Image (cartoon, grey):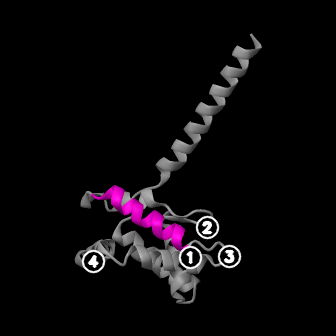
Amino acid sequence: MNHLRLEIIYWSCLLIAMAVSTEAASVWKLPTAQMVYEDLEKCRQESQEEDAATLRCLVKKLGLWTDESGYNARRIAKIFAGHNQMEELMLVVEHCNRMEQDTSHLDDWAFLAYRCATSGQFGHWVKDFMSQKEVER
């Protein structure tokens, strides 16, 4: 009987944890080019125009970065899902994230991992995404 009670408690805790993490994950929304530009302006002011600090501020505000694990490859891939290369993009982002990881210099880590990931086709996708805002003007 005690074994069954422990198992019920275990599964209840697991379901609660899953519900909480699902709720937290569902709060994140795909950023629009407009959102990126607005957050970019705020971050430029906060970081006094320093590139690496501005970038880290921006990707944190967009929910694409944490100081513990770096870039969230899955979220980045969702933004560019229309290119039908989500798995490949996630691999690139994860590789660059690991290669440049430096928890003692977070701004540099964010900047160097971004530069690494955007050195190929993904860089063109980022430029196209950002040009959407210019078209809207």
Q: Which residue is mark 2?
A: 67
Whether 34 is drawn above or below 25: the answer is: below
* Spot occupied by residue 17 in the image (x, y as percentages of width and height): 61, 38
Q: Are marks 4 and 2 in contact (CB under 8 Å)?
A: no
Whether 4 is drawn above or below 106: the answer is: above
Left or right: where 51 falls relative to 121: right
Foreground: disc 1 or disc 2: 1
Foreground: disc 2 or disc 3: 3
* Spot occupied by residue 94 in the image (x, y as percentages of width and height): 47, 63
Give the quarter of the image for residue 14.
Answer: top right
- Between the C-alphas of marks 3 and 1, the distance is 9 Å
Give the quarter of the image for residue 126.
Answer: bottom left
Using the image as rendered, state which of residue 121 and residue 137 is in the foreground: 121
Q: Which residue is mark 3?
A: 104
Foreground: disc 4 or disc 2: 2
Number of numbered labels in the structure image: 4
User: What residue appears at the point 58 percent right and 84 percent down from the top-left corner?
Assistant: 47
Q: Are marks 1 and 2 in contact (CB under 8 Å)?
A: no
User: What residue appears at the point 47 percent right and 81 percent down from the top-left corner?
Assistant: 41
> Quadrant location of the N terminus?
top right
* Spot occupied by residue 85 in the image (x, y as percentages of width and height): 29, 59
- Between the C-alphas of marks 1 and 2, the distance is 9 Å
Is residue 98 a member of the stretch shown in magenta?
A: yes
Q: Which residue is mark 1?
A: 109
Along the polypeptide, which appears first: circle 2 or circle 3?
Answer: 2
Along the polypeptide, which appears first: circle 1 or circle 2?
Answer: 2
Q: Which residue is mark 4?
A: 131
Magenta region, residue range = 85-100
- Between the C-alphas of marks 4 and 2, the distance is 28 Å
Secondary element type, mark 3: loop
User: What residue appears at the point 46 percent right and 66 percent down from the top-left corner?
Assistant: 95
Along the polypeptide, which appears first: circle 3 or circle 1?
Answer: 3
